């Protein structure tokens, strides 16, 4: 029997870890799914065993097994977690109805994506819910989703800790080029990247987007040259302004071909690299999505699949993708 002091020390996070361990039957696989070091998971399970006053896991074999006490706790733990998640969803949904905004994070890349039809569809479905947008890096958004500071994140999954998150893909983007208007390249044909080997470049700032910066370097190196970096730009708008000011060519993602800026010409790259791209996703906390969050995900994902057929009240099943691949 668990004493009163021990009951107070038991939190749902320990139960969540135990349920994952029971499903995986391996500390190594469970730690990988949870995104934590295996020794740390072992210590937390020991803490849970100390709290309940019983050994929950038989560690004598390579593949762990639950003890009778562990089997008894597993059934109760899942029921407790289901009830907690339901309570959190209902509370958050009530908060949205009472005026708390839906908090959406995004990187600068998403500001240019044609997502407005999906956002309009959500606003039609939920005129009572305000939308609050915050710009942040992917790593910041992942942390804020887990801490409850964000409801939805829009970012690229490069060097991000995705533990506890679920996501759906939105689009995949390839690179094109922007050059100063007076550079001697025709606009009516794709340009070989090697033709710009002797020209300066404006690249993404590695302090903000190290993976995009490295991809741009790799693109140039695959064309046979190391780019001469004249300036670094943090966001697309800054990079295009530097290009318009004559500092050098910059890489853009293909959706930017519809954006026009005086002093800049945009060129399609001949023989584009199919292995250099950016995957854009919408992410949320896996275990506790509220109805408002699910509706927002549905609207944006439907926009990707059927951009001209968004109807108020129309619903479809989401393809849930989790870090463990299920």
Image: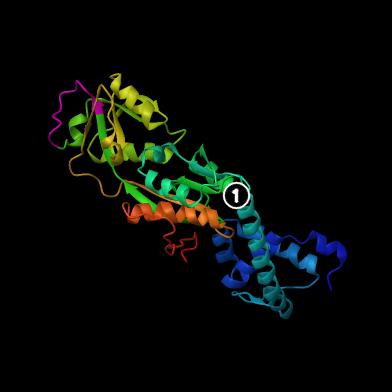
Residue visible at 57% across and 56% down in the picture: 290
Residue visible at 30% across and 19% down in the picture: 245
Residue visible at 31% across and 52% down in the picture: 308
Q: Position of residue 89 (x, y in %)?
A: 62, 58
Figure label count: 1
User: Label 1: which residue?
Assistant: 96
What's the magenta region? 179-189
Q: Residue furthest bottom?
A: 68
Location of residue 231 with respect to 26 vertically, above or below: above
Residue 5 lies left or right of residue 238; in this view the side is right
Q: Position of residue 120 (x, y in %)?
A: 42, 46
Location of residue 210 with respect to 5 vertically, above or below: above
- Mark 1, secondary structure of its residue: helix
Location of residue 223 with respect to 53 vertically, above or below: above
Q: Please state which of residues 82 and 180 is positioned toward the viewer in this rendering.
A: 82
Q: Please state which of residues 44 and 250 is positioned toward the viewer in this rendering.
A: 250
Residue visible at 67% across and 61% down in the picture: 87
Residue 237 lies left or right of residue 89; in this view the side is left
Location of residue 183 with respect to 44 vertically, above or below: above
- Quarter of the image that includes the N terminus: bottom right
Residue 260 lies left or right of residue 29; in this view the side is left
Question: Does the rendering let one see residue 103?
Answer: yes
Q: Please state which of residues 71 and 219 is positioned toward the viewer in this rendering.
A: 71
Question: Does the rendering let one see residue 57?
Answer: no
Q: Is residue 183 magenta?
A: yes
Q: Is residue 190 magenta?
A: no
Q: Position of residue 156 (x, y in %)?
A: 43, 46
Query: Picture quarter containing residue 240?
Result: top left
């Amino acid at each position: 029997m668990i004493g009163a002091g021990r009951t107070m020390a038991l939190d749902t996070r320990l139960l969540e870890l135990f349920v994952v361990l029971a499903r995986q039957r391996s500390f190594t696989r469970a730690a990988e799914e949870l995104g934590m070091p295996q020794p740390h998971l072992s210590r937390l399970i020991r803490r849970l065993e100390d709290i309940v006053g019983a050994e929950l896991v038989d560690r004598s074999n390579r593949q762990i097994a639950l003890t009778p006490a562990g089997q008894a706790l597993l059934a109760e733990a899942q029921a407790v977690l289901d009830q907690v998640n339901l309570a959190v969803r209902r509370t958050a949904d009530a908060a949205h109805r009472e005026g708390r905004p839906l908090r959406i994070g995004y990187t600068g890349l998403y500001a240019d994506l044609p997502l407005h039809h999906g956002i309009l569809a959500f606003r039609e479905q939920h005129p009572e819910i305000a939308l609050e947008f915050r710009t942040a890096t992917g790593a910041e958004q992942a942390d804020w989703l887990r801490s409850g500071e964000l409801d939805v994140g829009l970012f690229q999954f490069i060097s991000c800790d995705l533990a506890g998150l679920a996501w759906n893909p939105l689009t995949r983007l390839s690179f094109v080029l922007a050059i100063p208007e007076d550079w001697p390249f025709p606009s009516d044909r794709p340009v070989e990247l090697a033709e710009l080997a002797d020209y300066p470049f404006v690249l993404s700032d590695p302090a903000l987007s190290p993976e995009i910066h490295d991809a741009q370097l790799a693109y140039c190196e695959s064309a046979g040259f190391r780019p001469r970096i004249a300036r670094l730009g943090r966001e697309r708008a800054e990079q295009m302004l530097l290009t318009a000011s004559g500092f050098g060519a910059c890489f853009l993602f293909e959706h930017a071909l519809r954006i026009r800026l005086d002093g800049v010409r945009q060129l399609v790259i001949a023989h584009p690299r199919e292995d250099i791209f950016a995957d854009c996703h919408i992410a949320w906390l896996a275990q506790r999505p509220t109805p408002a969050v699910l509706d927002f995900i549905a609207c944006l994902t439907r926009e990707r699949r059927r951009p001209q057929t968004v109807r108020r009240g129309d619903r479809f099943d989401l393809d849930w993708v989790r870090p463990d691949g299920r």
